[in-house]
Image: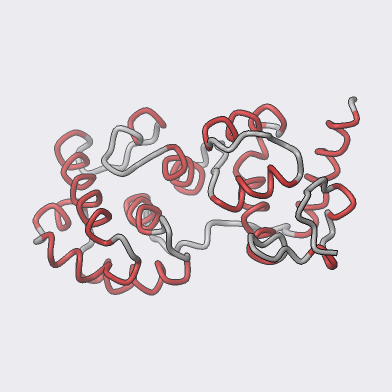
Amino acid sequence: MTEKKKRIQEIRQILRASYPDVKTQLKHNNAFELLVATILSAQCTDRQVNAVTGPLFSNLKTPKDFLNADLGHIESLIHSTGFYKNKARNIKGCARELVDRFNSKVPGTMEELISLPGVGRKTANVVLGAAFGIPGIVVDTHVARISGRLDMTRHKDPEKIEADLMKAIPKSEWNDFSLHLIYFGRQICKARKPECGVCFLEHLCYSQDKQL
C-alpha cells in the first residue's frame, strides 16, 4: 500500500470513528421532498431550508400540486432560501417533468435525475444516496474544500473532484464519506477559519492555510 493510500485509509477510519451515525440534515418524508429540499439548499443552510420546507410541504405535497401552483405562490413560500425565483422555476419545471415523464415518481438513476431542471450531479447524488441507497460522492462546498486541504484532489471542478474521490474511497463508503466531510466541515474545517488547533486530522493535513 502506498503512503497516500495509507494516509487516506487513516483519514477514513478517523472520520468514521468521529461521526459514526451520519445522514442528510435535510428533513424529508420521501424522495420528492428530498429533491425539492436539495434544490432549495443551493447557497443556503440546511437549517434555513428545514425552516421553509415544513410550511412548503403543508401547502404543496406532490409534483402535481407544484405543477398546478402559481409560480408567485411557490416563490413566496421559498423566498427566504435566496435565489428564490430561479429555485421556484426549477422546482416547477421538475414537477412538470416528473408528472409528464415519470408518472409523478422521482427517478432512481443519475442520467434521469440530471435531465430534470436545476438538478446537477450534486443534487442527484444526494437523492440517490439518501432516498435510494445508491452509492455516490456528493461534492458540495465542504467536500470540495476539505478534499483539497487533505490533498485528496488538486482539482477545483466538482466533477473532477468527484472522480478523484471515487477512485480513492471504496464504493461502499461513498455516501458516508461525503457526509463525514460535510459534518467535519461544519464543525471544524471551516472555510474562513479552520479550527486546526482542535482538529483530529491535523497530522494528516497538508493545507497551506492552517490556523495553528
**81 to the left or right of 133:** left
User: Whole-percent x and y of residue 50?
Assistant: 41, 69
x then y, percent, for residue 36: 32, 55
Query: In percent of the image, x 82 and y 48: which residue is there?
Result: 205
Q: Is residue 125 above or below residue 41?
A: above
Query: On screen, 193 above or below 208?
Result: below
The residue at 37%/28% (across/down) is 111
Q: Quadrant of residue 104?
A: top left
Name the image quarter holding the C terminus.
bottom right
Please state if 109 lies on the left or on the right of 65 as rendered.
Answer: right
For this view, does 165 lie left or right of residue 81? right
**Applied colour scheme:** secondary structure
Q: Quadrant of residue 169?
A: top right
Q: Quadrant of residue 6?
A: top right
Residue 37, given in percent of the width and then of the height, sits at 37, 58
Work out which residue is located at the far front of the displayed protein and give it. Answer: 208
| Quarter occupied by the N terminus | top right
Q: Residue at x 27, y 62 (%)?
A: 84
In the displayed structure, would residue 187 be above or below residue 113?
Answer: below
Q: Position of residue 199 (x, y in %)?
A: 82, 62
The residue that appears at 64% across and 49% down in the rendered structure is 145
Give 196 or 97, whichever is nearer the viewer. Answer: 196
Q: Is residue 156 left or right of residue 104?
A: right
As rendered, which of 193 and 101 lies closer to the eye? 193
